Amino acid sequence: MDATSVARPDPDAVADVVRRLCGDYGTRAVTGNAVREQHSHGEGLADAGMPDVVVFPHSNDEVAAVVRLCRAVRVPVIPFGVGTSLEGHVAALYGGVCLDLSQMDRVLQVNAEDLDCRVQAGVTREQLNAELKGTGLFFPIDPGANATLGGMTATRASGTNAVRYGTMRENVLGLSVVTAAGQLVHTGGRARKSSAGYDLTRLFVGAEGTLGVITEIQLRLYGIPEAISAAVCQFPDLESAVNTTITAMQTGIPVARIELLDDVQMDASIRFSKLEGFAAAPTLFFEFHGSPASVKEQAEAMQAVSNEFGGSAYQWATLPEERSRLWKARHDAYYAALAFRPGTTAFATDACVPISRLAQCILETKKDIEASGLTAPILGHVGDGNFHLVVLFDPTSDEARQRAETLARGVSLRAIAMGGTCTGEHGIGWHKLDVLAQEHGEDAVELMRVIKRALDPDNIMNPGKTVPL
Amino acid sequence: MDATSVARPDPDAVADVVRRLCGDYGTRAVTGNAVREQHSHGEGLADAGMPDVVVFPHSNDEVAAVVRLCRAVRVPVIPFGVGTSLEGHVAALYGGVCLDLSQMDRVLQVNAEDLDCRVQAGVTREQLNAELKGTGLFFPIDPGANATLGGMTATRASGTNAVRYGTMRENVLGLSVVTAAGQLVHTGGRARKSSAGYDLTRLFVGAEGTLGVITEIQLRLYGIPEAISAAVCQFPDLESAVNTTITAMQTGIPVARIELLDDVQMDASIRFSKLEGFAAAPTLFFEFHGSPASVKEQAEAMQAVSNEFGGSAYQWATLPEERSRLWKARHDAYYAALAFRPGTTAFATDACVPISRLAQCILETKKDIEASGLTAPILGHVGDGNFHLVVLFDPTSDEARQRAETLARGVSLRAIAMGGTCTGEHGIGWHKLDVLAQEHGEDAVELMRVIKRALDPDNIMNPGKTVPL
């Protein structure tokens, strides 16, 4: 990160903004150290940057007013959901105002007949699905963490269901965004498709708050499948598990989730989540959605592929509570990894490659891990070619941290060299700024800069993230 | 259209550019009237604007060189595929250089194992599918016309299969684009998903050549379904046909195509395409893709819904040649409509609404048509909430043209008022410039302008289209 490319804001301007916000928002503008510290980082590496004040807006107008205030005196604005980001997105690198949107948490509309809804940015995905109970609908995008939908939109998140339902890119129909000029803009609409003008929606999806603050999101919803079944299959080696995935994708089995946990991750998850009856071996978790007949057909096709690669008999989770336990174990994988080596800390990195390169990419990564001497479980949404490394290291050792960062960087560069991306779903934040040009080329990054400068000429929107200036 | 908002380029500059291009490209730079006239319009209304020269580049470098030449002296550049656009996209409103990309027609890569390919912008969708023969793969997006994939990308096209496979927005993985500065930029990649930086790909998809010239496209491919079946069902009235569609979508039947032809369109198509055994009544064409069991299940579910709304027995087309004949009739609907009232001319307009509003939108439109005294068949990709009007009118009467335009404008405004869009797939071009702000709001259009000005400060890229400046 080149933290020096942006000047810190004028201290007097910051003090003035803080004073005015405290006056305007009372107890919803917080300057206490504990709250500022909590808002200084996500769940990634120690990437803290303390904001000068944390404001909890309740409306689009309040967000717009805060941005206008900040813009007038060039003070940074950093949007914050619940702080589950992994690449340093929420660190206030230059201080400024943290806009915590968690109190903008209303589901504004559910249009069951059109399979869409509109939510405020602070609604979490679990809250949305809880509020959808009884409608027969659900929102499938599931990055594991109970993130806000604003944060998920801003990072172009995806997760376990993306292989079937797509990512936030495909599932956001429209947005309300407060621009750097403090104007509220509505993008997209409720039609399933449109050719009317530039795709502003997709410009803000994944922009990590650097082009504007997302305040509302129109989302696609889906009918809860008539039948759902989940299964677990274990493999003699990593290659077999990955090749099972590749074959399934290439033959077009419409599986809803296909998740890999390597031997180390399974070891950690068996301990952490008390998974019984499983070995610490490379494992795939599957979920099938459809009509009863189609789910049966998918599962049979999947079993045939697994058998080819020496997979174990399927262990089925058909009851909803069994399925929940299984997916909770999958979702807790990151925390299981953290608990696996007491005394270590960890960060997650992700990469995504064309499916034909997945086996080579994962196996070479596994060798790198061995060579590094670190513990780093591999897991991922392999149906998309997407996998994660949770890199554990001794936080008291600079050398260990350096080794961990080098390992992660190697994964990014390998994925890029294979025609893939340095991040399938976590985003750039500031940890991956230095590889963006390797992936897209300097000319494409320059185009991103042109857009950033045009939309945020004073660089007040989450400065220091997404695009190296 | 406000054609006066951009100055015509300096005639001497144009003459100089033409002279240089003729020198550099020989017979691939054409100034003859016939070729210029052919490149002055698409298939829409009489929207002609003659370019000063038509150049047929063979490579990215040649495209970049032409753009650099034009930029230096502020001469417009208008990309051209095969001229099937419907909203005036290719008219050289201010003269300039038409870049006809039809000779950049190579399929550059087919990565069968990753279900993707890379094509030059001049490859047509039929050519691509012909070249994919034997791979077991196909490219599903099918707007009817045998358009180039560059043109389809530039207009964010979709068509009959979009309800199942998405639009160009979802199926373009990456692009090569020559920017207004004459630089070749590569966007996106081959990974299925990425959170790395701004979504430049989606910015160019649908930008109608106003931000750059698309020269190459990385596309998703799909396995040819194991089983395909198609059927036709006729209905006692328009409302029943539309309500059948709405129910099918709301209950989640994963139909691959669901196409409406109203009584007038059926009358035209029966005559033009010699469709036997059908009445001139509101009709749905279906296609089902999947395993044999799943296709059977989908078809049974669909028949049950149609029966509820008084639909006729299904007429099946199971043999490939029967299916082809059926879909050829659907694809020829526009030409059938044109032939329906000899002596008239026609243009197509499209709109897309949330599915719950589709019946109301189409029925009110039908009333407007009756009130207008014009003939205007209704047809469309109703599974997406998308429908078209082919408005026939006497080209010798200004009054008739005015009535036709008023009718079309009414459809746009009604769709917008219902939370939909003035164009689901044809684009803005210049015919719909005046309704863009009604759909998105002035602030969103201003944001589009900011992007346009930042990426094309001299307004040389297809000027006068997409965004009113």
Image (cartoon, coloured by chain):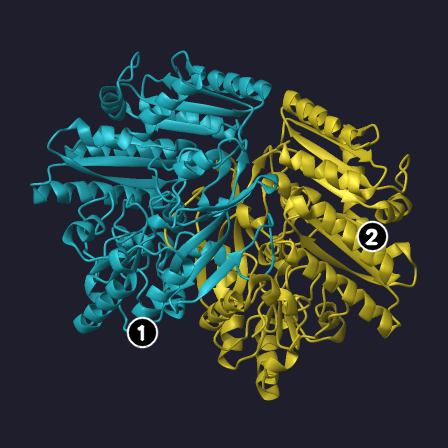
Chain colours: A cyan, B yellow
Res. B43 visible in picture? no
Q: Residue at x 70, y 75 (%)?
A: B50
Label 2 is placed on what type of residue? Pro
Label 1 is placed on what type of residue? Ala
- Quadrant, the C terminus of chain B: bottom right
The secondary element bearing badge 1 is classed as helix
Specify whether B159 is left or right of A288: right
Res. B419 visible in picture? yes
> Closer to the camera, A367 or B394?
B394
Q: Crowdedness of circle 1 by 10 Å Cα count: few (<14), some, many (20+)?
A: few
Chain at tag 2: B
Looking at the picture, how far across and down is residue A432, in whole percent? 27, 51
Looking at the picture, how far across and down is residue A30, in whole percent? 22, 56
> Closer to the camera, B154 or B268?
B268
Q: Which residue is mark 1?
A: A72
Specify whether A374 is left or right of A244: left
Q: Residue furthest left?
A: A396
Real-space Cα separation, disc 2 to disc 1, in angstroms: 55 Å
Q: Which residue is mark 2?
A: B377
- Quadrant, the N terminus of chain B: bottom right
From the image, state whether disc 2 or disc 1 is nearer to you: 1
The secondary element bearing badge 2 is classed as loop
Looking at the picture, how far across and down is residue B213, in whole percent? 54, 64
Q: Quadrant of residue A287?
A: top left
Chain at tag 1: A
Question: So how many labels did they put on this image?
Answer: 2
Q: Residue at x 82, y 46 (%)?
A: B262
Vertical order, B262 against B29 (above or below): above
Q: Quadrant of residue A354?
A: top left
Q: Crowdedness of circle 2 by 10 Å Cα count: few (<14), some, many (20+)?
A: many
Q: Residue at x 88, y 39 (%)?
A: B275
Looking at the picture, how far across and down is residue A303, in whole percent? 47, 16
